[in-house]
Amino acid sequence: MQDLRSVLIKHGFQFKKQFGQNFISDTNLLSSIVVASGIDENTTVVEIGCGAGTLTRALAERAKKVYAFDVDKDLQPVLAETLAGLENVEVIFRDFSKVNLPELEKEIGEYTVVANLPYYITTPLVTKLLEEGEKVQGLSIMVQEEVAERFCAKENTPQYGSITAAIALKGTAKIVKRVSRNLFYPRPNVDSAVVKITFEKDRIPVRSEKAYRQTVKCAFLNRRKTLENNLVNFFKVNRETAKRILQQAGVDEKARGETLSPLAFARLSDILVEAGIIKI
């Protein structure tokens, strides 16, 4: 394949800032992302934001099938060249955030997500996969380094937040590679990291995943306020009820949301369900 810049220039491709387009051309990096993802010839891959197709090609050389999504139809001639000769790639010009995930999963079965995600859509897309995905086995995604730290954070740290607890319900997150901004074209203003999220069925047993998510949302409603205050404001319960709920959950009434582990959130959400405060 020709040098990536030459291909883009040849087809008159213009980068669009609103899509957060930063493409990878470093072959060693592409190879390491594919290896870290753990995919093999039996794996179906969903790639979100395939860009110029460099990662797509590296994935297709190892995977059974790659469904590559991108919103920018101007990439069509570029991808026709960069993915030439590959029979196991289907490029879909659609906004993945608007895809009906249950319908897609019915069609493709179990899959792994591997992607160099545009920074501006990272958290919404991960949230969509966590909440709607039934057949997703795991995610290996390149994200902004700061976001990667948040995904993998432990309780009682500034990086720990609602997305951390949401990921922990479904699986384990680990930074497998840190990536310099100099390996992208065009060069972004921040460094990146590859996060691998491995899903485990019933990792943290809860009565209701929806109740767990609501509990987490409540806890981080206002980071500076205590859990007791957030319970009062979010669920519209009186202070005595909030104190009782926290006591039952074994949580200090003056604790803040970021001090609770995912297991503690699960326990608290179950108690909120039992008390009839969250309806399932």
Image: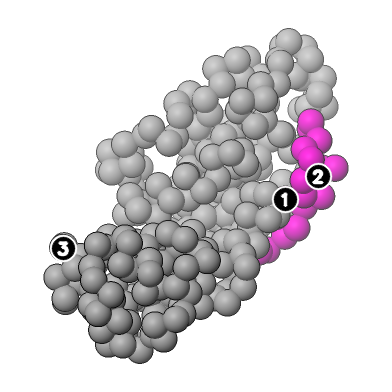
The residue mark sitting in front, 1 or 3, is 3
Q: CA distance from mark 1 to mark 2?
A: 7 Å
Q: Residue at x 68, y 49 (%)?
A: 144
Would you say 189 lies left or right of 146 here? right
Q: Residue at x 47, y 44 (%)?
A: 125
Residue for badge 3: 279
Which label was assigned to residue 24?
none
Is residue 207 highlighted in magenta?
Answer: no
Residue 159 in view in this figure: yes
Residue for badge 1: 192
Q: Earlier in the sequence, mark 1 or mark 2?
A: 2
Q: Classify residue 276 by image quadrant.
A: bottom left
Image spot of residue 119 (x, y percent): 62, 41
Q: Are marks 1 and 2 in contact (CB under 8 Å)?
A: yes
Q: Residues within 10 Å of mark 1 (few under 14, many from 20)?
A: many
Q: Amino acid at mark 3?
A: Lys
Which one is nearer the viewer's eye here, 28 or 87?
28
Question: Where does the C terminus fall, quadrant-wise?
Answer: bottom left
Q: CA distance from mark 1 to mark 3?
A: 40 Å
Q: Amino acid at mark 1?
A: Ser
What element does badge 2 sit on?
helix
Which one is nearer the viewer's eye here, 220 or 254?
254
Start and end of the magenta stretch? 173-193
Which one is nearer the viewer's eye here, 147 or 108?
147
Q: Earlier in the sequence, mark 1 or mark 3?
A: 1
